Image (cartoon, rainbow, N blue to C red):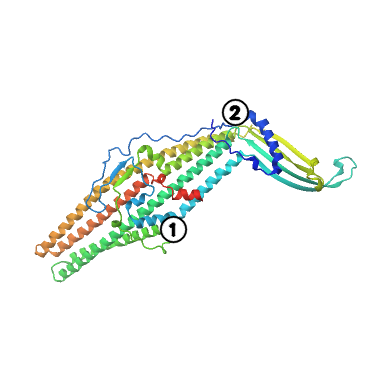
Amino acid sequence: MRSDMSPDRTNWESRPPGALRTVAIAVTSWVAVGLPLAPLAGCAVGPNYHAPAAPKTQGYTADALPSATEATAVTGGEAQRFAFGGDLPGQWWTLFGSQELNELIARALKRYPDISAQQAALRAARENARAEQGVFAPQVQGAANQQRAKISGASISPGFPSFVTSLYQANVNVSYTFDVFGGERRTLEGLRAQADNQTYQLEASVLTLTSNVASSAIGLAATREQIEVTQQIIAVEEQQLRMIRRQYESGVRTRADVLQQQSNLASVRATLPGLQQQLASYEHALAVLTGQFPHDAAHVQLKLSDLKLPEEIPVSLPSDLVAQRPDIQAQAALVHQASAAIGVATANMLPQLTLTGSVGDESLVWSSLLQGSSGVWSIASGLTQPLFEGGSLRAKRRAALDLYDQAGAQYRLVVLNAFQNVADTLTALDNDAQALKAQNDAVSSASAGIELIQRQYEAGAVNYVTLLTAQQAYQQARIAYVRALSSRFTDTVTLFQALGGGWWNRNDLATAAAAAG
């Protein structure tokens, strides 16, 4: 039986003098009735919740990961070392070394409405838990009544005349329900678990927000560079089309050659609106994420060259990941809440003991209401035991058990997905490094090819079309290189998110703001 959730006690010495007689009656009654039940006061029916044990798996991937990724001698191509067992900083985005990115995230944390909504939900959950604590104290109510009525004399004696009378009453009522089987304590336990769930929901929202801002900013920078390269390709294609038209007019080329080059140019131009729309979408997303209307937000000028690739990546041990992922902890709190609900459903099937008392004054004349002779008091106790509910109470308890099983299964699924997230991003970082090296080699080869063909063209060994084709291949390789570089930054953000975002090392953002509220 649980004994760690004893009810809060009230300092009765601070009560107003007018309630002293009520308090005396209540205390006497509690002593008389409550002492025999004292051995049960610490008991609470239902299962005692224990946090699920950490998974026993020893790693994230079936194949061993390298200690560091492959390095490429370009900005953003640095080798990334996996520091297994390391701890992620609370403000992980500062590892990218961009002041503009830091400012974007700071504005998002301050202005994004969902964070304020989650903070309000957390405060409400905590207040609901505080409100439930009130059931462990006696409920005291004051009442004053005045009644004037005509009384039939027949109710007193045949032939007795009717009369009009007044009745004045002033009393204080006290009631207390003994939590013998811990139903109220389980209710409080469930509300506290709900507050825990909301705390981790808030942290998960912060992590999602900061990751979305960082990923959108990186995507915007990469898209802008792709647009610049595409515009350069279009310029090359237009130049090549002009040359082929001149050759066609001089009889060197055919009409089919002109049409083919027009098709090539149109194909490249067709990719530009999609990139421009993608750029606009990133700008609109960043505006909303930072709490602004798209019309009012300034353009983000971030470039990939402004970002520093984090070279040392702290990677949590598998045994620590469960405690560090806010979504896992949020689901664990739901399991705790479902566990407490079983105790509540069980307690509802058992007897309920209530003690009530009142003290006050009652008089037919207002002027004598507060005289000693007008004093009245009462003490009563009641025991309620459900006898027949059509099976509803047992069904509700079975439903609570089923919901507990459901919450447990969902918890296991969240844990599995979390380990998949980490495994995916760890392997992605390694593959991104290899892809960047390959794309960098492709750019280097295309650049060297242009230089060679340029010399051959100047020497008359090749025609101008060959030179323009080489330039086009170089520009296409540059686009693929930009995408590969962007993936390294984006997947690094995704890994930091998959590892929980380091919220346990942060005390100046959402949780602190919610507590202050």
Q: Nearer the viewer, residue 410 or 465?
A: 410
Amino acid type of the residue tagged 2 in the rendering: Pro
Question: Is residue 462 at all visible to an observer of this figure?
Answer: no
| Residue sitting at the far front | 13
Question: Relative to 366, is 392 above or below?
Answer: above
Q: How many marks?
A: 2
Q: Which residue is mark 2?
A: 39
Q: CA distance from mark 1 to mark 2?
A: 56 Å
Question: Dividing the image into 4 quarters, which one contains the N terminus?
Answer: top right
Q: Which residue is mark 1?
A: 291
Displayed quadrant of residue 39: top right
Query: What residue appears at the point 17 percent right and 54 percent down from the top-left corner?
Result: 445
Direction from residue 448 to residue 196 in the image, left or right = right
Asked if residue 235 lies left or right of residue 405, the reply is: left
Residue 395: image location, x then y, percent: 56, 35
Question: Which amino acid type corresponds to the residue marked 1 in the rendered image?
Answer: Gly
Nearest to N terminus: mark 1 or mark 2: 2
| Horizontal and vertical percent position of residue 104 | 38, 57
Q: Label 2 near label 1: C-beta < 8 Å?
A: no
Q: Residue at x 20, y 60 (%)?
A: 472
Identified at 64% across, 29% down, the residue is 35
Q: For residue 66, which quarter of the picture?
A: top left
Label annotation for residue 346:
none
Image location of residue 53, percent across then percent down? 42, 34
